[in-house]
Every structure is written in structure tokens, then in C-alpha cells.
Amino acid sequence: MKKSFAVLAIAASIGTSVGAFAIDAASQRAHVPFSFKVGNKTMPAGDYRFTATESLLRVESLDGKNYVSTIITPSFNDHVKQGKLVFQNNASGMELSQLFQSDSTRGEKVFTERK
């Protein structure tokens, strides 16, 4: 059975440190083509499920081998038609910083570990 994933598209222009990737609206799944950090854990490139509750985000690879949970806080923005992930490129690599729900103005700011 073929699984469908949202096509990833970089929304930020070349040379900036932020990339935004589309999330499949129905399943909250996305393919992330690079390794990335969530909190203090580095996740390998791959296909992921993103599940948000009121204050927690669970990121789990679809093969079940990698998962992490972290604290989130509400973040509001302009209305987005398709959900998206936002990554920050910093000294430790790409880090998940926000995710936005489909057809909504609500998003979630991901807790990031600061040293």
C-alpha cells in the first residue's frame, strides 16, 4: 500500500536560516529530508508523525524506531491553508521550532534547549 506524504517545499528564500515544510493535513505526517533536533534529541531524516496535545508534542518516526516528546506553547499567525513545520538552522544543526495546523491560525512553538 502506497503511503502518501506531503510534498516538501522550502518557504524561506535561499540564504536564510529558516526552512518551512508542508505537513499532510489529514494525518499530521511529513517527510523530513535531513536530521533535526527536537529538544535535546537529534532525529534522523525520514518520515514522521507529529501529534500535539495542549502542552506536549510527540514526534515519532513511522517505522517506530525514533521518538521524542517536548513542551509546546500556543503560537498564533496568519491563517495557513496547509500545515507546516518550521526549522531553525543554528550551530547545532536544524532544530524544529514551530508547527502550524492546517486551515488554522493556531500553531505551536516548540521548546528549545538553550545552553
Image (tube, helix red, strand yellow):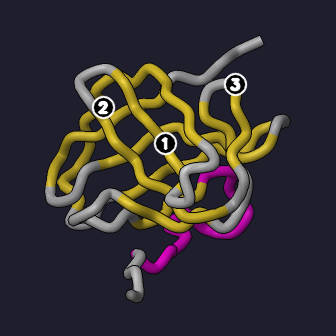
Q: Name the kind of residue labelled 1 in the image.
A: Val
**Quadrant in the picture for the N terminus:** bottom left
Look at discs 3 and 1 and give the one toward the viewer. 1
Mark 1: give few (<14), some (14-19) or many (20+) Cα within 10 Å: some
Q: Please, what secondary structure does the residue beneath circle 2 have?
A: strand
Q: Which mark is residue 75?
A: 2
Q: Please, what secondary structure does the residue beneath circle 3 have?
A: loop
Q: Name the kind of residue labelled 3 in the image.
A: Asn
**Quadrant in the picture for the C terminus:** top right
Residue at x 36% of width, y 24% of height: 56
Which numbered disc flags the more N-terminal residue, 1 or 2? 1
Locate residue 31 relative to residue 43 in the image: left or right: left
- Could you give the CA–CA distance between mark 2 and mark 3, rounded to whole angstroms? 21 Å
Q: Residue 59 carries which label?
A: 1
Q: Nearer the viewer, residue 6 or 18?
A: 6
Q: What stretch is highlighted in magenta?
A: 6-18
